[in-house]
Image: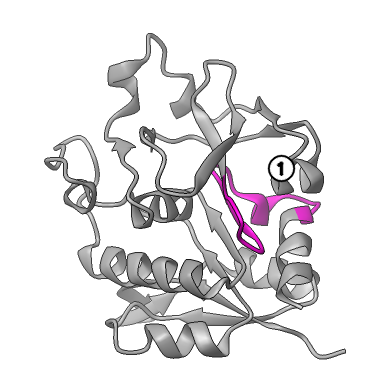
Amino acid sequence: MSRPLIGITAYFEAARWGDWVREAVLSPPSYAKAVTRAGGAPVILPPLGLHAVEDYVRGLKGIVLAGGVEVGAQAYGEDDDARVPEPQSHRDRFELALARAAVQADVPILAVARGMHVLNVAQGGTLIPWLPDVLDHERHGEQGPHVIQVSVSSKLGKAVGDKVEVVAPHTQSVRRLGSGLLAVAWADDQIVEGIELQGHRFGVGVQWHPERAEEIKLFDALVEAAR
């Protein structure tokens, strides 16, 4: 059985080889390894402009919107917050266009951490720019594990069960859900930790990093949908 091509979004920034510093397309290997283990063929997608977005969507069988620097606030109508790392506008533009095109074409999507925010904003949703401002605690910024409650009727729940323990430090979160999206996973303070596209073959976003886990059930589900 042939392996479906799964695109993975990536950074485009300076990297060092010995004494050389050059611009490079960068992707943590954990994404490609998870796609490979799940039976897919990973393809790294450089954020070099919008000219190839429609070609990617036509040629790929699935897309991973990977983690990284938070989405710039201007993408969802807010002012930039000095506490948030400087956004990568080129990556925002590329991934927002890619997400919209993939949704339109019913291409399976797994959106990870930043990727979940990209998917939400692409569908017209908004984010909380600085999560500690709306909570009386800072547990979401901590490195320790916490338990997420998952809707058992969702595609996410069918893949991982009704509860999952994750490590997912983040300083931003979903505020208003985008069109066609449902919240399907929550922390104990009701901050959204998972979203899902209604009526889509497979459109799942999670706040944590499933590519780092021993079990790669979400990647299994993505590749199965891509077949």
Determine which quarter of the picture holds residue 2: bottom right
Expressed as whole percent of the image width and height from the top left, the position of residue 100 reads 40, 67
21 and 24: which is toward the camera: 24
41 and 141: which is toward the camera: 41
- Along the horizontal axis of the image, is 220 left or right of 124? right
Expressed as whole percent of the image width and height from the top left, the position of residue 93 reads 26, 68
Residue furthest to the front: 199
- Quadrant location of the N terminus? bottom right
Expressed as whole percent of the image width and height from the top left, the position of residue 186 reads 58, 27
Q: Is residue 203 magenta?
A: yes
Q: Is residue 168 magenta?
A: no
- Along the horizontal axis of the image, is 200 left or right of 152? left
Looking at the rendering, the stretch of residues picked out in magenta corresponds to 196-217
Residue at left offset 79%, top offset 69%: 224
Determine which quarter of the picture holds residue 220: bottom right
Residue furthest to the right: 1
Residue at left offset 58%, top offset 84%: 60
Give the residue at mark 1: 154
Expressed as whole percent of the image width and height from the top left, the position of residue 201 reads 66, 64
Q: Is residue 124 visible?
A: yes
Q: Amino acid at mark 1?
A: Ser
Picture layout, residue 152 above or below residue 39: above
Q: Is residue 20 visible?
A: no
Residue at left offset 24%, top offset 40%: 84
- Along the horizontal axis of the image, is 210 left or right of 70? right
Q: How crowded is the residue under tag 1: few (<14 C-alpha within 10 Å), some, or many (20+)?
A: many
Instruction: Classify mark 1: helix, strand or loop.
Output: loop
196 and 110: which is toward the camera: 196
- Along the horizontal axis of the image, is 93 left or right of 111? left
- Quadrant location of the C terminus? bottom right
Total marks in image: 1
